[in-house]
Structure formats: C-alpha cells, structure tokens
Amino acid sequence: MNKSKTRKSFLIIMLFSMGFLNSCTDKDVYFDENKTLESQVWSASNDISFDFDINDTVQKLDFYLNLRTTTSYEWSNIYVFMKLEGPNDLVAFDTVAIDLADLTGKWYGKVSGSMVENHILFMKNVRFPQQGKHTITLNQGMRDAELNEIVDVGLTIKNAKQIK
C-alpha cells in the first residue's frame, strides 16, 4: 500500500473516531469541573470553590457532587457544607449528608481497583433568579478535621430533565 492511501485511510479513521467520540458527550452537561486534593486529604480548612455563569433564568438545573475516594476511606458517609453565592450578595447555605456505602461496607459508587467514583445528585430542579457569576463552595463537615483517602472533589451541573 502506498503512502498516499495509508495517509488517506488514517485521516478517514481519525475523522470517524472524532465524530463518534464527540457524539458520545453528554449534551445536557452545563458545567463540569473536578479538583484534585493534595496528598488525598480533605482538611476542614480547605474550601473547594467552583465558579459558573448563569445566563438563563428559566432553565432548571440539577447539581451533582463528584467525589472520588480510595477503598481505604474509613467512613461509609460524608457530610458536606455547601454555600451558594450569586450576584448582589445572594447567598444560600445547606448541609448535604451523603451515604457512600451500605451497612455491609459495599460501596455505592463505581469501583475500579482501589478507586471509588461517586456522582451524587444533591440539588434538583434549581432555577436561578439572576443571571451572572455564581460560586458554590464545598467543605467537608465531618467530625475529623482531616479526611484521608479523598482523591478529588468536583461539581457537575446538568440541564434538568423535562417531564413530559
């Protein structure tokens, strides 16, 4: 096979692959960001913030906490303090209690090797009254000042499913 045909075949395969991968993305995702924790420790003094813009005050949104731990995380749950700030000093606070394992110790999240990935819905059908920059700040609310074996913490915001 000559170089021209090889190059052409390679380009066709690459274009097909890129189109396929692009079609696999979740079009409902509005925002998605994860932050890796240094030394896999979430300290009570370590606020984790996510900034996002709201342009549509009609669209309802669902908020998910992305939490990746190791299987050595010693608790079956986690409490997270959440602060939501918006334009004009609009502020809301909440405490989110999240079960990560059942009573037998079986993880609820997706386990791969020594990693456990959790994608937890914690606010549903939220509509923002104001456009502009908003910030969600998360902090661990457990009794221990430092939580070991937490690899990263993230936030995913999706367009809420429309009920038909």
Image (cartoon, rainbow, N blue to C red):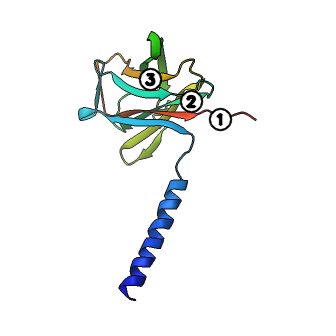
Classify residue 27 as left or right of residue 101.
right
Classify residue 13 as left or right of residue 160.
left
Task: Note whether 35 is above or below 89 in the view shown.
Answer: below
Q: Position of residue 103 (x, y in %)?
A: 50, 30
Q: Which residue is mark 2?
A: 62
**10 Å crowding of disc 3: few (<14), some (14-19), many (20+):** few
Say whether disc 3 or disc 1 marks the residue closer to the N-terminus. 3
Q: Which residue is mark 1?
A: 161
Q: Which secondary structure lies at badge 3?
A: strand
CA distance separating discs 3 and 2: 17 Å
Q: Are marks 3 and 2 in contact (CB under 8 Å)?
A: no
CA distance separating discs 2 and 1: 9 Å
**As shown in the figure, which amino acid type bears the numbered disc 2?**
Asp
**10 Å crowding of disc 1: few (<14), some (14-19), many (20+):** few
Viewer-side label of 3, 2: 3
Q: Are marks 2 and 1 in contact (CB under 8 Å)?
A: yes
Q: Which residue is mark 3?
A: 133
Classify residue 145 as left or right of residue 68.
left
Nearest the eye: 159 or 144: 159
Q: Residue furthest right?
A: 164
Q: Which secondary structure lies at badge 1?
A: loop
Nearest the eye: 50 or 89: 89
Q: How many marks?
A: 3
Q: Quadrant of residue 72?
A: top left
Q: On residue 83, which mark appears?
A: none
At 54% from the left and 18% from the top, the residue drawn is: 130
Q: Position of residue 144 (x, y in %)?
A: 31, 18
**10 Å crowding of disc 2: few (<14), some (14-19), many (20+):** many
Say whether disc 2 or disc 1 marks the residue closer to the N-terminus. 2
Viewer-side label of 3, 1: 3
**As shown in the figure, which amino acid type bears the numbered disc 1?**
Lys
